[in-house]
Amino acid sequence: MDQVKFDDVFERARACYSADALKKAPTRDEMLDFLQATIECLVTDQRRLESRIAELEAREYRGPHEDGKCYTRGQYVSFKGSLWHCNCETTQRPGDGPAWTLAVKAGRDGKDAR
């Protein structure tokens, strides 16, 4: 674990104790409480990060939009030359409601070289 993250965890765990309690050497029970608080912080952070990783890994391009097909949050489709992100489970077409967000707008057609 890098130093910045460790310091953050240490400060959050240490916040459980008053300034007076930190002036004397901690007892065995206080050290165990401190370690327990630190472990709880780490486990909470780990769960949050695992959840975020799963959410990010679920994002995938599903190809051109197909009418009637069900799409889920995090999927991308192309529709009329644009790329759309699905915000929630839907069978709607991109652009027909809040279920889709335009990610990349279609560009203009190019001119023929002469």
Image: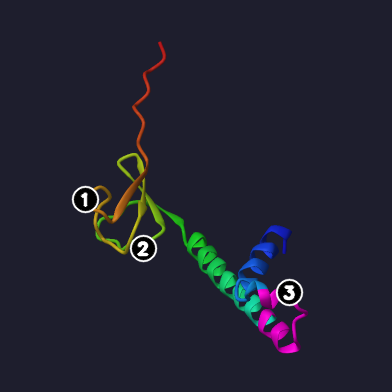
| For residue 36, above or below residue 77 | below
Dot 2: element = loop
Relative placement, left or right, of 93 versus 103 is: left
Would you say residue 72 sits in the magenta stretch? Answer: no
For disc 1, the neighbor class at 10 Å (few under 14, some 14 to 19, many from 20) is: few
Quarter where residue 74 is shown: bottom left
> Which numbered mark, 3 or 2, is in the foreground of this view?
3
Disc 1 to disc 3, C-alpha distance: 63 Å
Q: Quadrant of the N terminus?
A: bottom right
Identify the residue position indicated by label 2 in the image: 72
Earlier-in-chain disc, 2 versus 1: 2
- As drawn, the residue found furthest toward the bottom would be 29
- In the image, what residue type sits under mark 2? Thr
Picture quadrant of residue 10: bottom right
Q: Quadrant of the C terminus?
A: top left
| Residue 18 pos. (x, y %) | 62, 74
Please give the label number shown on residue 96: 1
Name the element at disc 1: loop
The tag earlier along the polypeptide, 1 or 3, is: 3
- Whether the residues at callouts 2 and 1 have beta carbons within 8 Å, the answer is no
Q: Which one is in front, 82 or 63? A: 82
**Which SS class for mark 3?**
helix
Q: Which residue is label 3 attached to?
A: 23
Q: Are marks 3 and 2 in contact (CB under 8 Å)?
A: no
Task: Write the start and end of the magenta stretch as one range.
Answer: 20-34
Mark 3 residue type = Lys
Residue 29 at x, y = what percent?
71, 89
Give the farthest residue toward the top. 114
